[in-house]
Image (cartoon, helix red, strand yellow):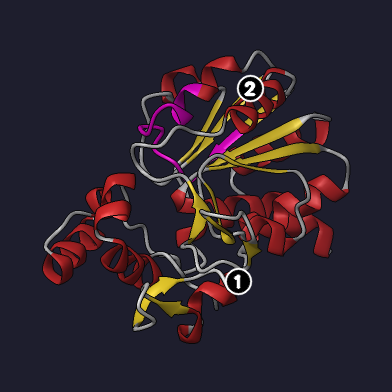
Amino acid sequence: MKDLYKELKEMIDKSRRIVFFGGAGVSTESGVPDFRSENGLYNAMKTYNHSPEEMLSYSFFRSHTDTFFDYYKNSLIYADVKPNNAHLALAELEKQGRLSAVITQNIDGLHQMAGSNRVLELHGSVMRNYCMDCGELYDLSYIMDEKNCRDEKGQTTKIPRCERCGGIVRPDVVLYEEALDHNVISDAVDAISGADTLIVGGTSLVVYPAAGLVNYFRGDNLVLINKSKTQYDGKADLVINDPIGTVLGACVLAEHAG
C-alpha cells in the first residue's frame, strides 16, 4: 500500500466523526459523465446550440421546457450505473460508526444505492420528482416513461405530466438561478463543524457556495483526494492525487474483505 494510503488509513482508524464531501469525480468512476467537462460542453453545443449551464437554468426550463427535458434525460440520467468503491467504502464506514455524513454535489442517488443513510444532497436528486402544481411525488421511472409525457393538448413530448392534475412534473434538483436548500446547507455546516476528519473527494472545489463549506471544518484531519490539484491543497493535512474509488477501496474495502 502506498505511504499516503497508509497515512489515510491511520487517520480513518483513529476517527469517530468522519464527514465526506464529494463532487462529480465520485460519480464519473461509475460511468456518469460530467456535463461540465469539455466533452459535455461540446456535445451540448453541437446538439442543442446551448451550453449545459444555460439549458439547466430555471429560466430555460420555464421557456424551453421540452428542450430542457430532452437534454436532461439524455445527459443527466444514467439509470444503469452502479456504485463504485468510493460509494461502497463510505457506506462501510457509516456501518462501522465512523462516518457521520456524506455531503454530495451529485444528483444520481448512488450513495444511497450503496447503502449510505445520511446523505446531504446539495443539488437535489434525479430520483425525486414532484408536480409543480399539486406537489404529487414521482420516481425517476415515471418521468422517463414516454406515456406520461405530453403537452397541454395531449401531444407526445418530453415533458412529464402529473397523473392527478396534469401539471408539469419537474426533477427535485437545484437548477442554475435557484438557491440551494437552506436546511440542507445548515445540516452540512453542522456536520462539517462537528467532524474530526473531513475527506474531500472528486471535486476541484471551484463551484460555490458548496466549495465554501470546507471553511467550516475545525477538526484534526483535512484530506483532499482528487486527480488534479485544488485551491485548498495548501490547507490540507493530506493530499492524494489518485481516483477516489481507488484510494477509499484500498484504505477501507481491502481490509474489510480480508
For label 1, the residue is: 82
For label 2, the residue is: 189
Please name the residue shown 62% across and 69% down the image.
164
Q: Amino acid at mark 1?
A: Lys
Q: Name the foreground residue: 152 vs 112.
A: 152
Q: Is residue 211 magenta?
A: yes
In this rendering, the answer to whether 156 lies above or below 234 is below
Left-right relation of 182 to 205:
right
Q: Gap between marks 1 and 2, in whole Å?
A: 29 Å
Q: Name the foreground residue: 57 vs 109.
A: 57
Q: Which residue ends up furthest to the right in the rendered image?
A: 96
Badge 1 element: loop
Q: Is residue 243 visible?
A: no
Range covered by the magenta-colored residues:
199-212
Q: Is residue 79 magenta?
A: no
Q: Residues within 10 Å of mark 2 (few under 14, many from 20)?
A: some
Quarter occupied by residue 88: bottom right
Please name the residue shown 72% across and 40% down the image.
9
Image position, residue 252 (x, y; %) = 74, 51
Quarter occupied by residue 103: top right
